[in-house]
Image (cartoon, rainbow, N blue to C red):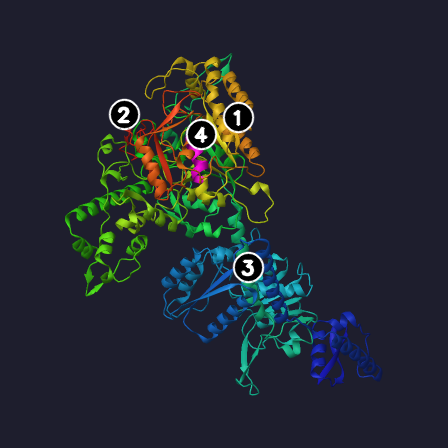
Amino acid sequence: MLTLLSLTNSSWVIVRPLYLPSKHAAVLAAAAAAQTIQDDYPLQQFQLGSEEDAYEGDRIVEKVVHDMSDSQAKIIDGTAIAKEIRTSVRDRIEALKKTNPTFPTPKLVIIQAGERPDSTTYVKMKAKACAEVGIDYAHVAMPADATAAQIIEEVQKLNHDSSVHGILVQMPLGENVGLEGERQVMESVSPMKDVDGFHAYNIGHLSSRSSEPLFTPCTPSGVIHLLTTTGFNLAGSNVVVLGRSDIVGNPVAAMLRKKDATVTQCHSRTPKETMINALRNADVVVSAIGKPEYVKAEWLKPGTIVIDVGTNYIPDSTKKSGQRLVGDVEFSQASGVASHITPVPGGVGPMTVAMLISNTLKSAERLWEKERARKLVPLKLNVLEKVPRYALVMDQRQFLTFHSDIEIAVAQTPKPITHLATEIGIRPDELESYGKYKAKVELSILDRLAKRKDGKYIVISGITPTPLGEGKSTTTIGLAQAIGAHLGRPAFACVRQPSQGPTFGIKGGAAGGGYSQVIPMDEFNLHLTGDIHAVSAANNLLAAALDARMFHESTQTDKALYNRLVPTVKGKRAFAPLMFKRLKKLGIDKTDPNELTPEEINRFARLDVDPATITWNRVVDTNDRFLRKIVVGKGEAEKGFELTDLKDMRERLGAMVVATSKRGEPITADDIGVGGALAVLMKDAIKPNLMQTLEGTPVFVHAGPFANIAHGNSSILADRIALKLAGTEPGETDSTREGYVLTEGGFGADMGMEKFCNIKCRVSGLTPDAVVIVATTRALKMHGGGPEVTPGKPLADTYTKEDLETLGVGIGNLERHIENAKKFGLKVIVGVNQFSSDSSAELELICSRAMQAGADAAVVSNHWALGGAGAKDLAEAVVAACEGESTFKFLYPLDIPIVDKISAIAKEIYRADGIELSELARSQVELYEKQGYGNLPICMAKTQYSFSHDPKLKGTPTGFTVPIRAVRLSAGAGFLYPLLGDMQTMPGLSTRPGFWEVGLDEETGRVVGLF
């Protein structure tokens, strides 16, 4: 029974007893408490107890009950809304994968310690939701007594696993962990993968008005989403939050404040009357206190929105389990007062899981976009005062003193290599750091980026150089700095690792120079990551293995040799796995060593090396004349591999031909049994090295073959990785995201560029877009008849003063290189590497003649003195020239005779009248064609100082015949290399090598005197 009250003089008085259903009674009680009757149904003052009073009271009661009954609360169906969210996530993943083939499948990993039934149930619910929407899911089960340190170790692995986008640690953990341990575990999760939203970083940003978290906690997010579906405007509203836990109460209060609601937060210490008064004025109530049906309908303001987060069990004999799940709010009564209300179950609960998978998708998109963003922040170039500068005042040049390259290099502080890797899109698990400033890159990155379109591919070459070099490396680095740091486009330089021969000899290293260098320059020019040492060790192991095999074959019978090669161990005799390769080569189809006939044993066990045909030297990474005499037999070693992956390296190592047998058969490293061991020594060397320029742009350093006696290019692997990192996603239309890879080809374009096109691009299948031909007034004047340029000696006046006549004659050398480059279908950009003594008339003459010869652009570049800023014009010319598709083509086909391929290079590139093979060279060519090596490309070994075989023939020589002294086979590398004239394959140190100046600063430990 409800005693209906009527308002008289702002006080409630009894009108009459009235029997109503409990639902209506609750409505009237709530209405009375909130003074709704006073506001909506004003009453006149009546005489207490009169019939008229009773009649009027009945009329008002009927109207209030009718109106209130029509406003029965709308149920906020969390189950249906959560399903909509899951469907939206599924559709979004499918759409992303359809339009972006490289978008990864989002992955959630849950760590659970122990097997608490409730935790296991929650985990299964999340796994089921992931499966529904197409999110990969993994469960890391740990024992209940797992320590915080053990759990953190697992978390850290997942942090560094780029395939994982969301990490959730299922709480609670074991009792042994404790609250402090749980906090440490939660904060060990990367904020970028904290899809549960409870990392201190995310909670802190959630509480701040000036920032936004990466993720918001799932249950509070679900609460806000449910409120949004009602259409209610939270701004300026009164909201009461019951509870102050870090799981719901505190974060949901913070989120409501961010939406400009006035939030009152009540908790266990709040007086009950204070709480009830707050509820009676609340437009929205969020309850998360864990007390079953605690909040009564009469405490609520009619029309309020109720979000019930509580999950409580009360006894219920009608249920099979003997209990029933209820919320914090007395639903049966409150639903008659509220305008909207969430049921329990079926309200907030399903939303928690839905928001978790939504966060996981958000994380996958964010991490994917971050990888694609490639936002490189350049290093500021600190130009030192003593750098040589010049000013043209009445044609009088003013010079300042020089800083050495090493002084410039050590004055710059590089970025941590891990930071640079992140900027260019390399994941942590794809990087293997070697100290702070250099690292190796895992080849697995190629699989991840396989669907990307390659960036633009430019080879940096040059005119025929002087012994001092004309600045190809410097131009490569300066151009990379200009494109990457000044044009803001992705740019990668790919250069070779310098040998200790030139480093400690005359020419110097290969890090560039001035303000266009690779840093740390001393580490670059010395050991780097040990690749060259690995190559030396592998080479010398093969030489030792060959020596040993020849020795043992000469001292043992067939039977003794075979028994030692295939010994009986513990009563069993078996071939080593690698031996089956030789058996197959010999046509012996047997697997039991005991079944071989004496004749088969002889063929298997004896290589019968012909000492006169050995082509394998011992090596050392220094110019050493003495090594010309210390050989296993006669000839030279393999010349520079071009590898595509680990399997390719293993096959090429095993296929290296080191000699010919007396039967005329090629003997390989696998025949000797050492191919696998060589691969082990080289397993890390195959990974390209990542470094940086002075302006913080990326550089790949890998392999170091010379261009005069080998192919003179950095590795295919380095170029391929760079091209993918510089590339664009399928369907991407923003041309400004397309990057540029600048790879250096050694010496002049007749050497490094020709071998890049005819050898490297054949093996790799990559298509270059352009070539930059580096020219200097110094080299062109030398080709125009200027005096000899000798390292260590002062330059003649013609090189330091204007001499347009000599220069004009020498430009013919540049013009021939331009013509040669055009034969490969390449765009040609001439980069004039400016010296401080060059006159404007000289520079203008070079550029105008280059354009007349067919260059697509000719630009003066001052990157040595100014870094990337000095090469900006050259960079813009390269970008413009590379627009459109490549028209690249090879100079010769592979299926013509070896002699014809050699002749094609001599005539088309060198402009010789023809070639002349020695008797030895002819016999070698016949042998290689007989052995099946006739389809290999050609790698000419000749002087770098002339188009011809003779270093004395400068400029643009014609009317000469190229003598071919010998033709060597590099079966593993995959080419034949003719030796032209008297070309030496092992240079020697000069009388006054560069190592005289090299040393250490004993106080700082820094390298000094290195260039």
Disc nearest the viewer among 2 and 3? 2
Q: Which residues are magenta?
A: 748-760
Q: Which residue is mark 2?
A: 990
Given residues 295 and 105, the one toward you in this image is 105
Predominant SS along the magenta part = helix
Given residues 281 and 463, the one toward you in this image is 463
Q: Which residue is mark 1?
A: 859
Q: Earlier in the sequence, mark 2 or mark 4?
A: 4
Disc 3/disc 4 C-alpha distance (Å) = 50 Å
Local packing at callout 1 (Cα closer than 10 Å; few below 14, some 14-19, many 20+) is many
Disc 1/disc 2 C-alpha distance (Å) = 36 Å
Q: Which mark is residue 749?
A: 4
Q: Secondary structure at mark 3?
A: helix
Question: Is 752 included in the stretch rendered in magenta?
Answer: yes
Question: Is 74 included in the stretch rendered in magenta?
Answer: no
Left or right of residue 992, residue 321 in this image: right
